[in-house]
Amino acid sequence: MRVVAVMNYKGGVGKTTLTANLGAVAASRGLRVLLLDLDPQTNLTFSFFSVDEWHDRLKDSRTIKQWYGTESPGNEVSLADLIVTPERANHVLKETGGQLDLISSHLGLIDIDLELAARLGGTTTLDGSKRKFLDLHGCLRAALEDGRFSGYDLVLIDCAPNFGLVTKTAIVASEQILVPAKADYLSTLGLDYLAGNCGKLVEQFNDFVNHKGGSGGHRAIDPSFLGVVFTMVQIYSQQVVLAQHTYIEEVRLNSRVPVLDSKIRNSPRHFGDAGESGVPAMLGASAKDEVVREFDRLADEVLGALALPSGGHR
Ligand SMILES: Nc1ncnc2c1ncn2[C@@H]1O[C@H](COP(=O)(O)OP(=O)(O)OP(=O)(O)O)[C@@H](O)[C@H]1O
Ligand SMILES: [Mg+2]
């Protein structure tokens, strides 16, 4: 099982679209994929379930809010009990042998995130506060060690556009971080800051793991950046438009975060009605569409870097 966090501080850069569609392409190649929606905006969840379905079947008992919202995440509700199988997407996948499951988010997760962060301050001893830091930041990682997750090849975590405690639990749980970005000044501005903050989190976590007072069963972490994927790229005459090309090269040359070769073009025709059908656009689109080929190349690149069997092109 490989765990990848999809994150960027910047909102609206295509994180959720990329998570849903990359997961779908990986599943269409026969992989077992779990998507984890950690964004209180709940957009990934609503890409697979209608608002009515979510209200009737998930809201009160099967969302990540119930898990993070307990006194000690994981002690009362088991993360694996929250897994749901979106029917419409899996109906399309049934010939492929792949599987696309989801753990749903909840709009109330925003309050839980703040409560969790407040809990960090409640301990007076140094050993106690280090232990609390490890238990809270390491909770998702520990939960994913449940044997019921071992059947998944790939877990993709869709993070909120912030660096709150819930996002930090995703970083700690992940081996790799994928960073969707638009090729413009504001979207690329925060990349090094993001890398710096992830680095600081890893350093602090590992420092506490090695603390003489005991790690409480937590092990050191070493997540790395799989890279930046440029999304919503403007293509004109088969070429990336000059202004965006300049930003992409600037990041490639100067950023601490590597840049993947794959890019995803701007395609309102495919992504304009995000989610309404319950089936990620790449599962329904024609194999001739350029954006389908781009997602195929991205899947090759990501699955290859994760040493997962990437299957053939459709
Ligand atoms: N390649 C694309 N072409 C055209 N539109 C796109 C593309 N990718 C995403 N979009 C659209 O852009 C908007 C933002 O995308 P998305 O929700 O995936 O971003 P996000 O980074 O997850 O946002 P947030 O930070 O709010 O969670 C959505 O309306 C989506 O449908
Ligand atoms: Mg999103």
Image: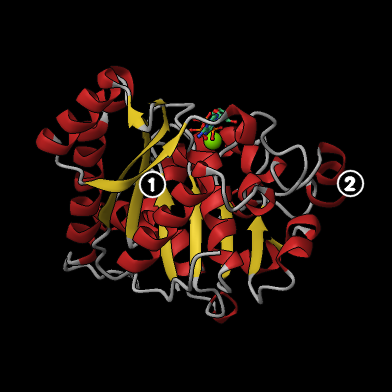
Query: Outermost residue, front direction?
Result: 237
Check disc 2: other Cα within 10 Å, few if <14, some if 14-19, many if 20+.
few
Q: Secondary structure at mark 1?
A: helix
Q: Quadrant of the C terminus?
A: bottom right
Q: Is residue 130 visible?
A: yes
Residue nearer the viewer, 232 or 294: 294
Identify the residue position indicated by label 2 in the image. Answer: 56
Q: Nearer the viewer, residue 15 or 205?
A: 15
Q: Nearer the viewer, residue 13 or 29?
A: 29
Amino acid type, mark 1: Lys
Mark 2 close to ligand 2, CB under 8 Å: no
Can you identify the residue that label 1 sits on?
A: 168
State whether residue 244 is above or below residue 33.
above
In this view, the residue farthest toward the left is 254
Q: Where does the image place residue 106, in percent across and percent down from the top left?
A: 68, 41
Q: Quadrant of ligand 2?
A: top right
Instruction: Give the Cα distance between marks 2 and 1.
Output: 30 Å
User: Relative to 282, is 82 on the left or the right?
Assistant: right
Asked if marks 2 and 1 touch (Cβ < 8 Å), the reply is: no
Q: Position of residue 128 (x, y in %)?
A: 32, 56
Q: With 189 as the anchor, is 12 left or right in this view? A: right
Disc 1 residue: CB within 8 Å of ligand 1: no
Q: Is residue 66 above or below residue 11?
A: below
